[in-house]
Image (cartoon, rainbow, N blue to C red):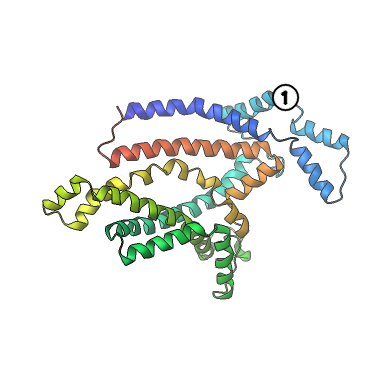
Amino acid sequence: MLAYILRRLVWMVPSLVAVSFLAFFLIQLPPGDYVTTYVATLAASNEIVDQRTAQELRERFGLEQPFIVQYWKWITGILLRGDFGLSFEWQQPVSGLIWERMGLTLLLTSSTLAMTWAIALPIGVLSAVRQYSLLDYLFTFIAFLGLAIPGFLLALVLMYVAVVHFGQEVGGLFSEAYQTAPWSFDKFLDLLAHLWVPVVILAVNGTAGLVRVMRANMLDELHRPYVTTARAKGLSEIRLLIKYPVRLAINPLISTIGWMLPQLISGATIVAVVMSLPIAGPLLLQALLSQDMYLAGAFLLLMCTLTLVGMLLSDILLALVDPRIRYD
């Protein structure tokens, strides 16, 4: 296992280099650059920027240099100095902008993931064990309903309920009085009071999908010969389910960690925009729209890193959970 992990870590280096080059290339693929977008935005507000000023801005940001030169400066700055560059739009270091959003993003995503798994796993198991019962039909109906409701629509409905019935401020993760205040216990309580709305919204769709996956996996395992053998040996039903079918049926869910980690950044962008959540998704979207290549490139590179790390973690966990899986 140790040799396998080391090989995977070594292969991550050329993979990330290739991905960083491709991401940097794709960001610059649309016509124009950040200055073009900036000038168009000013023109929409009846502010005219002459060609000389636009050229000076390109020289200031280094946009007149060839693509390979821009990429080389960016990637060497990351590797040698840990410098992800300066955001054109925000005029701030990219690393500061990213880590400023990642704390709240991690809290929101981990809370959503914990709620999703805590609800979906027992419901999926119960639905499979009581197949074609009233509970199974009820859970199936709720799961399909959760899959069908768009996240942004549910966000608007819950925001309305929170305002009208609970008298709570909606939009963002803090009340106005705490948005710029330093961290304190009262600010943390205010965060928790606002956190439940986006967590419920984001968990609905994920829970509905996991319920269907867990139910299907459990139905496959419940009819295997080892279940019949364990039941014939007198093993209690609860212990039998936890020790064998649930342990194996959860494998496909563990394998999804590879795409769950990058969702820390890209997930729930539409819901975050609707609710004005200060997380990474809207910032990445704005960077792509404005062609802020250093900020967008850093986000994409971080997403690819999380994908590779998530895939490695899922492979290791699969080997620990399922004794049939071994990496030689």
Q: Could you tell me which residue is drawn at 49 percent across and 27 percent down?
A: 13
Percent from the top left, x then y, of residue 26? Answer: 64, 33
Q: Is 150 displayed left or right of 246 in the figure?
A: right
Q: Nearer the viewer, residue 45 or 227?
A: 227
Q: Nearer the viewer, residue 291 or 247?
A: 247
Position above or below: 131 against 296: below
Q: Quadrant of the C terminus?
A: top left
Name the residue at the front extreme: 132
What count of labels does the image hold? 1
- Answer yes or no: is residue 254 visible: yes
Percent from the top left, x then y, of residue 180? Answer: 63, 58
Q: Quadrant of the N terminus?
A: top left
Q: Which residue is mark 1?
A: 66
Image quadrant assignment for residue 89: top right
Q: Could you tell me which residue is drawn at 78 percent across and 38 percent down?
A: 36
Name the residue at the bottom extreme: 165
Percent from the top left, x then y, of residue 156? Answer: 59, 64
Q: Is 195 displayed left or right of 298 in the figure?
A: left
Question: What amino acid is labelled 1 in the image?
Answer: Pro
Position above or below: 139 against 39: below
Name the residue at the left extreme: 233
Position above or below: 328 against 57: above
Q: Secondary structure at mark 1?
A: loop
Image quadrant assignment for residue 252: top left
Percent from the top left, x then y, of residue 20? Answer: 58, 30
Q: Could you tell me which residue is drawn at 78 percent across and 33 percent down?
A: 58
- Answer yes or no: is residue 278 visible: no
Q: Could you tell me which residue is drawn at 74 percent across and 30 percent down?
A: 62
The local crowd at label 1, few if under 14, some if 14 to 19, many if 20 or more residues have their Cα within 10 Å, is few
